[in-house]
Amino acid sequence: MKKILVVDNHPAMLKFMSNLLEKKGHHVLTAGDGLSALDILKTYIPDVIFIDLVMPNISGDKLCRIIRSMPKLKDVYLIILSAIAAEEKVDFYELGANACIIKGPFNKMSQHVLAALDQLDLGITLKLAGKIIELEDIHEREITKELLSSKRHLEAILRNLSEGILELTIEANIVYANQPAISLIGIPEEKLLASNFTELFHKTHRKRIKDLLGGIGEAPQTITDDSPVILNGKHFSLNILQVKDEEHKSIIVILDDVSERKRMEAQLKRAQKIEAIGTLAGGVAHDLNNILSGLISYPELLLMEIPEGSPLRKPILTIQKSGEKAAAIVQDLLTLARRGVAVTEVVDLNHIISESLKSPEYERLKSFHPDVQVETNLETDLLNILGSPVHLSKTVMNLVSNAAEAMPDGGKILISTENRYIDRPIRGYDNVAEGDYTTLSVSDTGVGISPEDMERIFEPFYTKKVMARSGTGLGMTVVWGTVKDNKGYIDIRSTEGKGTTFTLYFPVTRKEVAKDKSALSIEDYMGKGESILVVDDVEEQREIASIILKKLGYSVTSVSSGEEAVDYLKSNSADLLVLDMIMDPGIDGLETYKRILEFHPKQKAIMVSGFSETERVREAQRLGAGAYVKKPYLLKNIGLVVRDELDK
Amino acid sequence: MNFGKLAEDLGLEREEYLELIELFIETSMSDLDKLQSAIKEVNVEKAANAAHSLKGAAGSIGLMELSETAKEIEEKVRNDRLEETAEAAQTLKKKLGVIAELLRW
């Protein structure tokens, strides 16, 4: 007597098989589909299982695999009993089955079924494996082949979707999963099938899923990507719909992995926020910049007038220093406005780092944090990058100072540089595109950054520090702005309690670092009485420029608009124009220069502006204008440029 | 129709055979309903599946004539001649009805 399970969706087939087998004294149970079979197999361990291939609720081939993956059933004798086997070479051995019988008229089938069982008794199972018990007359091959190929066609489509598709019974047991669903959920098919969909989720999500499945009716139910469910560490949106045909209802679940989309959205939002605040800050900074010109330029002029040893020198020097400090903050703000980055030079990052580590600022930092060790590991043949040395050294210092402050009890900071070729995009805080990079990493062994802080770390004025001691609240924002202005990327790896590593990726340049100009004395750029026309709409600016240039030995005239300048030059001449780029109202620097060129085609000019080089500046330069000087300017800057241009 | 003879051909007891054929009729009626609605809806896949199931079951149980008719329907459906199958489906239904009637005796 054997214990036998027959699985087939045709009732007549089940009846025939149980009659046949019971008459031979076997104990027989039957199941109408794969899922019910698995239910029975929870408590019943048969010696032999007959399985039909084409069935609803877990097909025969999948059922075979599931059974073979269950340790307690690994020795059961599996016989496939199918009509398909006649048309299609079924690789039943690959399915884990021991034999395969082709369906046909009952009289033939009973012979084959009994023969298969006899062979099992004789222990010649191995001999049987590999051989399909054939029918003498096989009809209709072609037709069923078509049926099979259309099924396979559908399966190919399902396999290549990006969404995971599951079919569930009304009780939420999984009876079908396409390939993407299996890999998204991360559970092998033989475990996934017949398991309960709700149980896949963490306890806290189950009620939500249950409610969703419970609410299913005519209308589909959804979990949108606004509040996705988490499964296998990924965020999913769900679409759940009911399908009905004459005999059974089932539920289709469409799983859409929205993790990536969510991440991109968050990244974009973050960048937009920093940009928006940065633009605002930049706008304010631009106005401040003009006001500061007075504070920086006048002390310099005053100091030239006041004799050495005057008691006034010290307070005036203090005013000048304060002005320069304020200008530095304004520069930070302008960096954020992204238009404010003045200089792009070929830079050796190693040089920047070693200079920064010699700076007084660094010494002060060391004295605040005596227990912090700083080590460097710099690549010897580091490739150059394009950037602003001032901002880059600020970036280094800001990162080092943050690292030091993350270690109140002391620790180690490692500054390293590396040439790196990124051959496939990295997905981290930023998405790093493919290319050649010079990287700067600053690691600490400090407290780490919480995920909430990580979200906002680059926002202006988002600080965890004591403002008075540590700075402006703009440090990290400057880091961000600097990296973005250099078309670079940022990656942050942080573990709370373990430490943080910032890695900045800068695209390399193949240009060489320009040699430093030797220091110049004022004699090198003194004027020789040449005439200069200053065009600026702001009165103080005109005055500062006039005083400086007169000091340098030029003959200076000034006008307050582009139109005035054009008029003036119709009846006068000037060796050089000092043109403000942005004048409001009225025509701007470029337009002014264009109009003057119409009647003075060789007119020399330099340009000044609070903002950085713009397309309009470059256009003026194409027309023949000379260098560009950023406000607020020092005597030396403008003196050099004016001299250069006149000497051309 | 001689059920005794059919049973004998398949190596089955008459009583057993009658039981099986009753199950067959029941399932096949539902397959046939499916087939007819599929023909109406012009759903090729569904019609072919229903005809295929009918063909197989009828063959198993020794009702070769029914099996042949179902086979013809399946072939036509597969060859884009769905509209020509309505009559054959009706014939199948009638035949099944006749067998069901006979069984009651």
Image (tube, coloured by chain):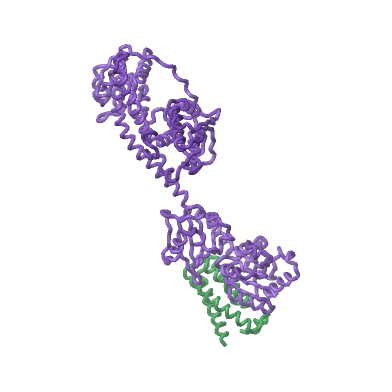
Query: Which x, y percent locates residue B99?
Result: 57, 82
The percent coordinates of residue A387 (x first, y second) are 44, 29
Q: Nearer the viewer, residue A248 or A345?
A: A345
Residue B81 is at least partly visible in this image: yes
Chain A tint as drawn? purple
Q: In the image as oriented, which residue stretches furthest toward the bottom? A: B105
Q: Percent x, y for residue A145? A: 60, 63
Would residue A89 be visible to someone looking at this image? no
Left or right of A644: which side holds B62? right
Q: Is residue A215 above or below residue A312?
A: below
Q: Quadrant of the N terminus of chain A?
A: bottom right
Q: Is residue A613 above or below residue A204?
A: above
- Left or right? Give the position of A258 relative to A322: right
Task: State the green chain.
Answer: B
* Nearer the observer, A294 or A185: A294
Count the marks.
0
The answer to which quarter of the image holds residue A637 is: top left
Q: Is residue A648 above or below residue A66?
A: above
**Relative to A59, does residue A521 appear above or below in the rendering?**
above
Residue A197 in picture, x, y percent from top left? 51, 62
Residue at 48%, 24% (x, y): give it. A513
In which quadrant of the rendered image does the C terminus of chain A lie?
top left
